[in-house]
Image (cartoon, helix red, strand yellow):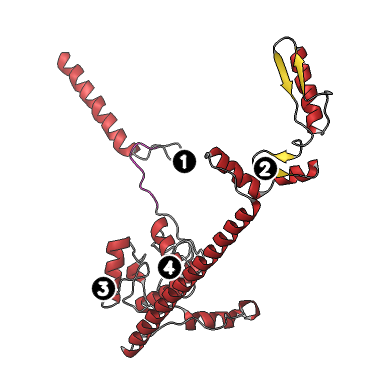
């Protein structure tokens, strides 16, 4: 206990720069001798051999990169280096790194120029072949300032145009409307409800193409999406490749020759033996005849026994 207390006491004084003992060493007991640092070595960094003028300067030195670098060299078994040598090495390393980074940027700049040149050459080739190249407009339209009619006109001009042979759910292109309907039915299970009552098949197909390509609206749930690809992916993933004619009769009434409003349910046939509202069996006549036949057979059996 005496040794522990003395150690803590002496270390506290060493930190604050004081000497708790009058001499440079003090004997505790018969064997242990505690050596205290001299006043000359109290402000010297043993790793860098740096002599500070005050304890604050010594604490600041311990936070420098020079001291950390010498600590790493000490762990590796190397001798410490002076501050001037450390600064020279740092300057050389920073200069080499900057030069390497500038060369890398120059190399990346050349690659970007090569890619841009390839894209320009491909674009000119497509234009030479007569293909249309969709280039983004220099300034995006101000949708907030547009009216509903102006926005619809802009959508009609900038949206994808679907022909009667183009599928509503992918990029398939058929020979005509009949071939396209057969493909969508075979691939996605699409069908036109009450097709025998459709009065304008071409008009219905054109309306559906406008709804999907221009409005980007789902055929079944009427959810709106940002792009044609998004609404197609939604309909395929959710199984919405179908028409909700019964849920939206007013939307499709112009293409049918019958009223698509609510229709009464078909009257179900009553099974034999069911009781009607009057409390009488709907099969009473046939059942009564069977009962009379059973009574006649019983009478005949009685006569034969007699």
Q: Is residue 71 above or below residue 245?
A: above
Q: Which residues are magenta?
A: 267-274
Label disc, if present, on residue 179 of the rendered structure:
3
* Of callouts 4 and 1, the N-terminal one: 4
Residue at 52% across, 83% down: 137
Assess disc 4: are there few (<14), some (14-19) or many (≥20) residues with their C-alpha within 10 Å of its C-alpha.
Answer: some
Q: Which residue does the numbered mark 1 point to in the structure image?
A: 277
Tell me if 305 is positioned left or right of 55 in this view.
Answer: left
Task: From the image, state whether disc 1 or disc 2 is nearer to you.
Answer: 2
Residue 288 seen: yes
Label disc, if present, on residue 49 of the rendered structure:
2
Task: From the image, state whether disc 4 or disc 1 is nearer to you.
Answer: 4
Q: What percent of the width, then of the height, locates residue 249?
A: 47, 67
* Of callouts 4 and 2, the N-terminal one: 2
Q: Which residue does the numbered mark 4 point to in the structure image?
A: 229
Quarter of the view holding residue 18 = top right
Of 130 and 125, the residue lying toward us: 125
Calculate the distance from the C-alpha at mark 1 to the C-alpha at mark 2. 113 Å
């Amino acid at each position: 206990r005496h040794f522990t207390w003395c150690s803590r006491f002496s270390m506290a004084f060493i930190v604050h720069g004081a000497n708790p003992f009058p001499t440079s060493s003090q004997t505790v007991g018969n064997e242990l001798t505690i050596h205290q640092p001299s006043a000359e070595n109290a402000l010297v960094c043993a790793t860098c051999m740096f002599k500070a003028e005050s304890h604050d300067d010594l604490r600041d030195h311990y936070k420098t990169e020079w001291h950390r670098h010498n600590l790493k060299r000490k762990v590796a078994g190397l001798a410490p280096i002076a501050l001037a040598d450390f600064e020279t090495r740092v300057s050389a390393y920073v200069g080499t790194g900057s030069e390497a980074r500038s060369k890398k940027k120059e190399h990346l700049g050349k690659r970007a120029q090569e890619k841009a040149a390839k894209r320009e050459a491909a674009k000119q080739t497509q234009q030479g072949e007569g293909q249309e190249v969709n280039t983004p407009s220099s300034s995006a339209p101000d949708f907030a300032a547009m009216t509903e009619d102006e926005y619809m006109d802009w959508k009609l001009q900038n949206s994808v145009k679907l022909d009667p042979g183009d599928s509503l759910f992918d990029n398939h292109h058929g020979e005509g409307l009949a071939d396209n309907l057969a493909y969508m039915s075979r691939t996605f299970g699409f069908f036109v409800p009450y097709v025998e009552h459709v009065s304008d098949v071409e008009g219905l197909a054109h309306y559906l193409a406008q709804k999907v390509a221009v409005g980007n609206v789902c055929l079944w749930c009427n959810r709106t999406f940002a792009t044609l690809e998004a609404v197609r992916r939604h309909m395929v993933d959710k199984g919405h490749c179908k028409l909700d004619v019964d849920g939206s009769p007013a939307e499709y009434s112009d293409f049918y020759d019958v009223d698509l409003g609510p229709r009464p349910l078909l009257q179900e046939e009553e099974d034999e033996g069911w009781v009607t509202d009057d409390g009488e069996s709907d099969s009473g006549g046939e059942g009564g005849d069977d009962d009379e036949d059973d009574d006649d057979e019983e009478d005949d059996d009685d006569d034969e026994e007699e």
